Amino acid sequence: RAPGDLPARDTAGDVADRATAGFRQRYAAEPAGRWAAPGRANLIGEHTDYNDGFVLPFALSLRTVVAAAPEPDQVWTVCSELTDEPVRFTVDDLAPGRVTGWGAYVAGVVWALREAGHAVPGARLAVASDVPLGSGLSSSAALEAAVLAALVDLGGLDLPAEQRPRLAQRAENAYVGAPTGIMDQSAVIRCRAGHALFLDCRTEAVEHIPFDLDAAGLAMLVVDSRAPHRHADGEYAARRRSCEQAAELLGVPALRDVPTDGLATALERLGDDETRRRVRHVVTEDQRVLDTVALLRAGRVREIGPLLTASHTSMRDDFEITVPEIDLAVETALAAGALGARMTGGGFGGCVLALVEATSVDAVATAVTAAYAEHGFAAPGHVRVRPAPGAARL
Ligand code: GAF
């Protein structure tokens, strides 16, 4: 993989072959099957999921693939193409905190399945992935979802797709220890090709919204800022806490319950400016998701650009989760003709989405790369993406 570039557009075939090859090499046997789960980009609706609000992610064609076979004993071994050291654990190792590092996402899924009363089969697994790590494209949810799909099929477990996101989220919250919402796991499991997933994070009701960029003559460019994540975990948890405290002060179950037309009154009731800005982000962001959905339902894809950009401004100024590299990518993309641009994902680094005319993908990517060089930032990655399907057996 060339430095400065995310993997080329559709590497699904290759990544599946790599998972199989990894399995054969490690275990000198054939896998019983291969299961894939994608990374995701969130079109709009950031930090709204844990406020019981709305999100609109879509799956990427960049995928994580797990080749797996059952084991007679309650032992799990997992190897990855990224390291020589396989992770191995038994039932005795399953208490949260026992398996750490990337293996925790796998152990967490086994743990959450068992906690939910499923008879999880022992397994050997081999992982390969084209989802860049730590770029805010949900490589962790992709790993959880691929492992979950594999274990459910290998064990013949009864776990319908709509119940899987909660279980994978539980693995991440309670086993890995990251206080994330339900968006990423829902996206990588429930998304459909050619559609964005409109998810009500309170009820988990979904609507698959047609999102056909090609038909509109448009393209979606993902720019990987490659900015180092700065205190992302602590800051994420702090944002979540502020939101929960604000909801409590306002006497509502969650910020989702502050209506847009009641925002001004709600803000007046909050003491400090920082909390006011956090609340304003969440409430206006929920509305932007609804507005985006309305435009997409009406086939007015081109018109969502300003909503994306407004979302970014809100994340930058009110929620304060962007970093200079990210803001530069957004500003440069807009100056180079993007119809809208915003950071996607939890923030403090990660990726920017730019909605561009199909004819100006290269111009926008080149402009961002040049601006990074001018500012002395490491070269960004970029890839054109289209809404892809969610987790599946291959
Ligand atoms: C991360 C989290 F995992 C999601 O649950 C969500 O909160 C997102 O940040 C911000 O929208 O990806």
Image (tube, rainbow, N blue to C red):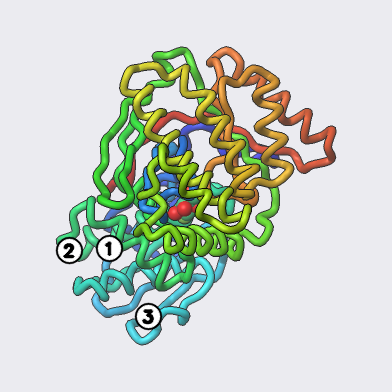
Quadrant of the image containing the C terminus: top left
Does 379 appear above or below 294?
A: below
> Label 2 is placed on what type of residue?
Leu
Label 3, label 1: how many angstroms apart (C-alpha)? Answer: 16 Å
Q: Which residue is mark 3?
A: 94
Q: Earlier in the sequence, mark 3 or mark 1?
A: 3
Q: Earlier in the sequence, mark 3 or mark 2?
A: 3
> Crowding at label 2, few (<14), some or many (≥20) Cα neighbours within 10 Å?
some
Label 1, label 2: how many angstroms apart (C-alpha)? Answer: 8 Å
The answer to which image quadrant residue 73 occupies is: bottom left
For image coordinates 43% across by 14% down, the residue present is 216
Does 296 appear above or below 393?
A: above
- Asked if residue 372 can be seen in this view, the reply is yes
For image coordinates 38% across by 56% down, the residue present is 254
From the viewer's perspective, is the residue at label 3 or at label 1 nearer? 3
- Asked if residue 13 can be seen in this view, the reply is no
* Image spot of residue 142 (x, y percent): 42, 52
Mark 2 CB in 8 Å range of ligand 1? no
Quadrant of the image containing the N terminus: top right
Q: Which residue is mark 2?
A: 157
Mark 3 CB in 8 Å range of ligand 1? no
- Is residue 299 found left or right of 365 in the rendered image? left
For image coordinates 56% across by 29% down, the residue present is 221
Q: Which residue is mark 1?
A: 151
Does 23 appear above or below 317?
A: below
Does 362 appear above or below 286?
A: above
Comparing 301 with 267, the one in front is 267
Label 3, label 2: how many angstroms apart (C-alpha)? Answer: 19 Å
Comparing 113 with 346, the one in front is 346
For image coordinates 41% across by 52% down, the residue present is 255
